[in-house]
Amino acid sequence: MYCPKCRTFPLKQATVKEGGGVAINYCKQCKGFWLEKGEFEKVSPLAIKDLSLPAEAKKVLRVCPACQELMFEFYYPQTYVTVEMCKSCEGLWVDAGELKEIETVRDGLKSKGKFQEYDDVCGIKGALLNFIDKAINTLQAL
Ligand SMILES: [Zn+2]
Ligand SMILES: [Zn+2]
């Protein structure tokens, strides 16, 4: 499996402890990660169940690490977090760049004196950001 972004870097596997022990594939180079169908649902009760490709998704020049087909880009529902999905296997690719989004939300909460688990205050968006945040922290510790 190769990174859809870096192309020549093979994905590695890591276990995200805080996410309920789910094993995810990630790229050591760009720190993006790959969630197989249903993996996000496994770790968060707030994840969209049976997420399928929205009609507005746009085909991008990134290849699914599992199927080698071009993936489609869209905003994860109820968030401004861009994800890429493979039409065939419905795996999701999330760039480490989404960390910026996390930081923005975190700063916003801090200024409101509400710095806590994002899930509680941001619903689905919070759940996704929480998971990304924890996954990235795990990857940085490797
Ligand atoms: Zn990469
Ligand atoms: Zn695929």
Image: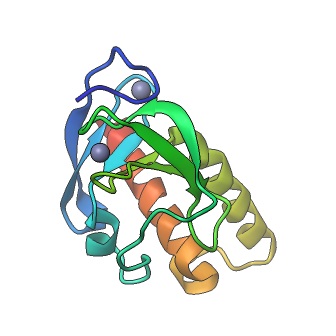
Q: Position of residue 103 (x, y in %)?
A: 66, 53
Q: Residue at x 24, y 39 (%)?
A: 66
Query: Where is 79 relative to 45, above or below?
Result: above
- The C terminus sits in image quarter: top left
Side of 120 where 53 appears, left or right: left
Side of 22 where 2 appears, left or right: right
Q: Position of residue 60 (x, y in %)?
A: 55, 36
Residue 117 visible from this viewpoint:
no
Q: Residue at x 56, y 48 (%)?
A: 73
As drawn, the residue found furthest toward the right would be 111
- The N terminus sits in image quarter: top left
Q: Position of residue 38 (x, y in %)?
A: 27, 67
Q: Residue at x 55, y 42 (%)?
A: 59
Query: Where is 70 relative to 55, above or below?
Result: above
Residue 50 visible from this viewpoint:
yes
Q: Nearer the viewer, residue 111 or 76?
A: 76
